[in-house]
Structure formats: structure tokens, C-alpha cells
Image (tube, coloured by chain):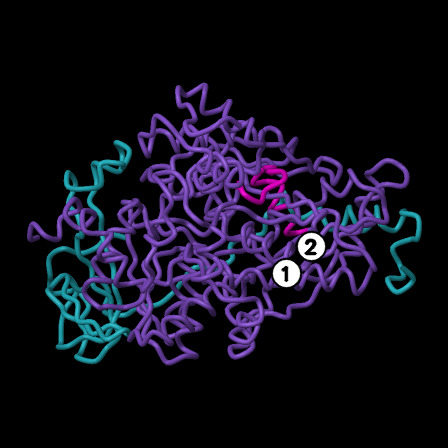
Chain colours: A purple, B cyan
């Protein structure tokens, strides 16, 4: 290996590689070490809702059905106090061409790449987004490379990710399969340098604007059918793009009172870059291993300023257990005739518990479904878990221990959510902001940016920074 | 499944133009990202890529492929025949009863759970 392809030297030139591969200048939006003009960036570098709709129409994306889960709603009401148990609906995003809402993001990214004249697109992702990019690239006659983390050092592949490899190859993409590690990004950088392909990043403004149609559609659909806005919109949260795009779309539809609730599978205790832990989890996305770090420091990705900023939009954040999601997957199939994958069922598991909080005439929307099949299915995942030393049994879901025990509920009433303290996450974000930028003083403009970015009052931000020894200069608040 | 790192007489062969898989080490142990935990530090970052063989070969020997994206990549031939074998797996007894039990519960619910279209 030459010196210039070493890990350190490639990472040192990442800003240049990214600039060429995204065709987007971020400097004009930057205001300080801390603040940047987020709305300006989304407006100037994103696409309008109408334009996104048009782009998505071109490749068969969006306008997915909103399905009412009548039997599950009945069960929720049976396990709620009298008069309670909101109506549960689900937005069937599996109807998109490659089987998930990620097509909404990919459609705009790949359109953008074609418009700018790139010969191909690249995405570093082990999830549905890879298949979505490959599918869109196939439609728009662009070459495609997907880089994935698939194996541990024994060359054992996570079955769900192996299925993603298959799907990307089915669409004619090249797939680069790696063993576990954060160097996924480094490999993507090397490939971008070599090929001059477009980086179809998950975190670009145009990618996030692709998700806004989802939020907008679901609000319109609920209004049309029920004459009111959804009380809760439950969104599976990992990298933050799902929450951000959906909330922005719902706000554009005027649903100012709809509560946005992020839901993740609790995988606390497992290290995402560990060779040992990699195959001891049964979920490859929609979990706290991404959900917490990406909320508390969004600017950790392959773009200088992340367009996915979940703390800006989350009203609540809850977790469910691995066992809950497997149980709910079975319930959805057997009671509603819908065989769907884990990402959407994470939110469904949370929504079932959350719907109990509300009166019967309110609506709770589960914001996505995804396709399922070999490798993704509970049978595949639970068999895999057992082969990797994880115990699987029934019991109280509170006994789930990520990496060691999966406990499947014995009764519908056991489905619960664990509330995550968002104020604690906001303070964690502030701590990261101070540590990463090294600032010792901030301006009122920085305070304004930070309070929007964490959805808190300026007082909360000022106090939080004060505890970190950072004070405000410029004027009194 | 282990990757053969030396060709031998029994190793499978491929012909030019076959869709095959190659393997190579991206970063040896010791040259990885400083952010990786200790267990990952000890192992190399490995890579597998599939494409059309540019010449006849044998598992364990050098091979160059052209990938679906048109790149030419060199490595060790790791699979002369590729495929996907991930599947569903055995029935899960812990999940098996859920549907039946809930159906019974639904039948007892007010509204009976029988007529969907009466809501």
C-alpha cells in the first residue's frame, strides 16, 4: 500500500474528496464554529416539495397507501383503560420500488447526480438505502457501487445485510463487502477518488428533502380520511434522516400539533465497531447504536454539515426491545395479513404502547413499513442469534439483554416503551458541540442556532453551556 | 467458511467471463482506524468483490475481475461460483403461539373482531 492510500492520509484529504463527490459548497452556509444557516442550506441546496414530487413521480416513488390496523387497534383498546386506545395506521412504504422509504431519499440523490453529469453513484451503507440507490441508478442509467459492512472476522455475514448485498446486485450494482469497522467511510472515499462517482450520501440536503413528501402525504391522508391531524407520528430513528424529513414534511402540511416520536430498538451495551458484538445483535438499523450518537452529534458523517438533525424535530424518543419487535412482526402478519420487515415494526411496537395513552378518537401513524424476506425475517434472525450464542426465550421483555438474551413477550399487554430523557441528550449534544469545536465563548447567534438545533429554549442552552464553562458574549439575553 | 489462501489441485476453477468473487485485505491489523475497539484492532479489514473473471483461474490464486460498475479489481479468487444462501430458518416456538392466542382474544373483544367493515 502506498502512503497516500493509508487510512490517515485518505482521511486527511476527505474534505477535498467530498467536495468533488457532492458538488455542494457548504462554506456559504457556515456562520461560526458552531452555527450554520440550516434552513438556508435546505432551501438553497434542497429541492422544493413540488420538485421532489415530480422527481419521485418519474421513478415510481411515493404515494404509498395508508393502512388502518383494525385488529391491532382492537387489541390495544382491550389493553387500555376505558375509552382509550387510539386508532393505529401504518404508511406502507414497502410499496416503493426497492421496498422501503429509502427510495424517497435515493430518488432525489440519484436525480441530482444525473443532473450534474456524474457517471455513477456510490453509497456507503449496509441498509435499505443501498438497494434504493441501486434501483434508482438502474432507472436513470447510472453506474452504481454500494459499500457495505457485512462480515465479522470469521466471515460470518449478518443475514439481513447479506440480503441487501443480493438486492443491490439484483439491480446491477457493484457491491463491495467489508468486515466490520468504521473504515467503511475510508473505503468509500478511496472509491470516490478512483471513480469520480457522486456520493449519494444519506445526509445531503437533497436526500433529506426527499423524505419530506412522506410526512406531507401521511398528514394529508389522515386528514382526508378522519378529518383531523394525527396525534402522534411514530418514526423509526437511527441516523436521523427519517425523523428530520418526516417532521419537516408534516410541518409543511401545517400539522403543527402532531407529536413526532422517534423509536429505536435498545441495543445499549453493544459496541457498533466491535468484531465480537457485530453478529450478536439482531437489528442492523433503527437502533440506539446509531440513534443516540447521531442525535447527540449529527455532524459526524460524510458531509460537513448534516442535513439530518433529529434533536431539532423530536418531541419524544422511546425505545423498545428486540423481543418486542419480533413479536409485533408476527402479530402484524397473523392479524393484519401484512408481512413486513423490522424497521417499520420497530415503530409499530412503540406505537402500540403509545396508542394506549390517547383516547379512541385520536390517530397514531406508524410512519413506515419495509419489505421482508430471507435473512430479514424473524425466523432467520432468531436462528442466527441462537447460532451466535444468544439465548432466545419468552417472558417479560424487560429481561432483554442486547447481545445475550432476547425475550419475546408472552402477552400483548407486555408491550411497553422506555422513555429516553431528551433533555439529557440535549445536554450531551451541547457537550459534544463544545468538545468538537473547542469554543470557549459563543455569540447570541450561536445560542439561537443551538436552541433551534436541540428544540429547547435559549435559557436551557445558556445554562447548559454555562455548566461547561462556556459563556455568551455580545449582548444580554 | 474460510477463504483458501493457497491454490491446490482440488480448488475450484473458473473460466474467463464467469461471475466470480475475489478477496483482498484493505487494511492489515495494526493499520486500522484509531477509533476501533481492541477486538477489531487485532483483525484486518477485509474486502470481497464480485465481477466477471478477466482470465481463467483457480480459487486461491490471483484473479482480476471487471465489476458491474466497470472497475477492474485484483485480488485472490475466493469463489469460482457465487450464490446467495441466506434463508428463513426453523420455526420459532417462542413466536408460534402469538397469533392463535391473539385471535382468541379478538373473538372475545367488544365488536367481536369478526366484521372489519363495520368500523
Q: What chain letter is assigned to the residue under label 1?
A: A
In the image, A145: left or right of A371?
left
Determine which residue is flagged by label 1: A339
Q: Residue at x 59, y 40 (%)?
A: A323
Tell me the magenta residue range.
A311-330
Determine which residue is flagged by label 2: A332
Mark found first going from the N terminus, 2 or 1? 2
Where is residue A115? Give x, y as percent.
Answer: 38, 76
SS class of the residue under badge 1?
A: loop
Where is residue A226? Give x, y as percent.
Answer: 82, 59
SS class of the residue under badge 2?
A: helix
Check disc 2: other Cα within 10 Å, few if <14, some if 14-19, many if 20+: many
Residue A324: say if magenta.
Answer: yes
The correct choice, above or below, for B99 with respect to A119 in the image is above
**Cβ atoms under marks 2 and 1 closer than 8 Å:** yes
Q: Residue at x 20, y 36 (%)?
A: B42
Where is residue A38? Give x, y as percent.
Answer: 46, 50
Amino acid at each position: 500500500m502506498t502512503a497516500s492510500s493509508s487510512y490517515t492520509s485518505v482521511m486527511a484529504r476527505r474534505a477535498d474528496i467530498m467536495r468533488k463527490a457532492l458538488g455542494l459548497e457548504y462554506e456559504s452556509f457556515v456562520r461560526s464554529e458552531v452555527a450554520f444557516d440550516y434552513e438556508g442550506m435546505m432551501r438553497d441546496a434542497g429541492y422544493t416539495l413540488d420538485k421532489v414530487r415530480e422527481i419521485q413521480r418519474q421513478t415510481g416513488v411515493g404515494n404509498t397507501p395508508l393502512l388502518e390496523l383494525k385488529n391491532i387497534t382492537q387489541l390495544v383498546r382491550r389493553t387500555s383503560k376505558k375509552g382509550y386506545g387510539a386508532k393505529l395506521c401504518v404508511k406502507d412504504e414497502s410499496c416503493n420500488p426497492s421496498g422501503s422509504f429509502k427510495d424517497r431519499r435515493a430518488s432525489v440523490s440519484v436525480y441530482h447526480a444525473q443532473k450534474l453529469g456524474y457517471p455513477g453513484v456510490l453509497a456507503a451503507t449496509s441498509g435499505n438505502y443501498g438497494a434504493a440507490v441501486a434501483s434508482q441508478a438502474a432507472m436513470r442509467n447510472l453506474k452504481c457501487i454500494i459499500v457495505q459492512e457485512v462480515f465479522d472476522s470469521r466471515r460470518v455475514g449478518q443475514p439481513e445485510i447479506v440480503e441487501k448485498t443480493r438486492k443491490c446486485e439484483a439491480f446491477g450494482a457493484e457491491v463491495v463487502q467489508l468486515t466490520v469497522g468504521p473504515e467503511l467511510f475510508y473505503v468509500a472515499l478511496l472509491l470516490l477518488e478512483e471513480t469520480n462517482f457522486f456520493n449519494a450520501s444519506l445526509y445531503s440536503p437533497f436526500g433529506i428533502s426527499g423524505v419530506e413528501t412522506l410526512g406531507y402525504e401521511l398528514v394529508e391522508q389522515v386528514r382526508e380520511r378522519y378529518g383531523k391531524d394525527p396525534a402522534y407520528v411514530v418514526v423509526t430513528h437511527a441516523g436521523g434522516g427519517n425523523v428530520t424529513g418526516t417532521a419537516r414534511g408534516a410541518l409543511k402540511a401545517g400539522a403543527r400539533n402532531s407529536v413526532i416520536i422517534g423509536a429505536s430498538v435498545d441495543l445499549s451495551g453493544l459496541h457498533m465497531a466491535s468484531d465480537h458484538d457485530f453478529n450478536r445483535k439482531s437489528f442492523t438499523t433503527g437502533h440506539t447504536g446509531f440513534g443516540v450518537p447521531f442525535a447527540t452529534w449529527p455532524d459526524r458523517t460524510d458531509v460537513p454539515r448534516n442535513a439530518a438533525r433529529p434533536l431539532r424535530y423530536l418531541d419524544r424518543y422511546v425505545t423498545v426491545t428486540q423481543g418486542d419487535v419480533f413479536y409485533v412482526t408476527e402479530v402484524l402478519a397473523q392479524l393484519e395479513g401484512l408481512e413486513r420487515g423490522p424497521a417499520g415494526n420497530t415503530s409499530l411496537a412503540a406505537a402500540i404502547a403509545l396508542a394506549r395513552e390517547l383516547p379512541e378518537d385520536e390517530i397514531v401513524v406508524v410512519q413506515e413499513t419495509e419489505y421482508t424476506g430471507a435473512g430479514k425475517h424473524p425466523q432467520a434472525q432468531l436462528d442466527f442469534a441462537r447460532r451466535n450464542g444468544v439465548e432466545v426465550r419468552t417472558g417479560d421483555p424487560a429481561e432483554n439483554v442486547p447481545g445475550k438474551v432476547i425475550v419475546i413477550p408472552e402477552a400483548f399487554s407486555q408491550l411497553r416503551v422506555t422513555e429516553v430523557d431528551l433533555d439529557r441528550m440535549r445536554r450531551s449534544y451541547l457537550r459534544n458541540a463544545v468538545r468538537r469545536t473547542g469554543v470557549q465563548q459563543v455569540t447570541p447567534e450561536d445560542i439561537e442556532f443551538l436552541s433551534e438545533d436541540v428544540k429547547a429554549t435559549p435559557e436551557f442552552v445558556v445554562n447548559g453551556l454555562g455548566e461547561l464553562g462556556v459563556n455568551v458574549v455580545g449582548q444580554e439575553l | 467458511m474460510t477463504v483458501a489462501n493457497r491454490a491446490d489441485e482440488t480448488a475450484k476453477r473458473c473460466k474467463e467471463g464467469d461471475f466470480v468473487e475475489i478477496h483482498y485485505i484493505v487494511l492489515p491489523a495494526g493499520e486500522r482506524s484509531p477509533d476501533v475497539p481492541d477486538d477489531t484492532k487485532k483483525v484486518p479489514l477485509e474486502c470481497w468483490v464480485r465481477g466477471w473473471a478477466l482470465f481463467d483461474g483457480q480459487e486461491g490464486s490471483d484473479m482480476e475481475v471487471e465489476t458491474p460498475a466497470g472497475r477492474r479489481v485484483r485480488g485472490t479468487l475466493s469463489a469460482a461460483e457465487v450464490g446467495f444462501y441466506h434463508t428463513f430458518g426453523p420455526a420459532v416456538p417462542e413466536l408460534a403461539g402469538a397469533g392463535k392466542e391473539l385471535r382468541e382474544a379478538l373473538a372475545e373483544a367488544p365488536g367481536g373482531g369478526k366484521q372489519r367493515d363495520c368500523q
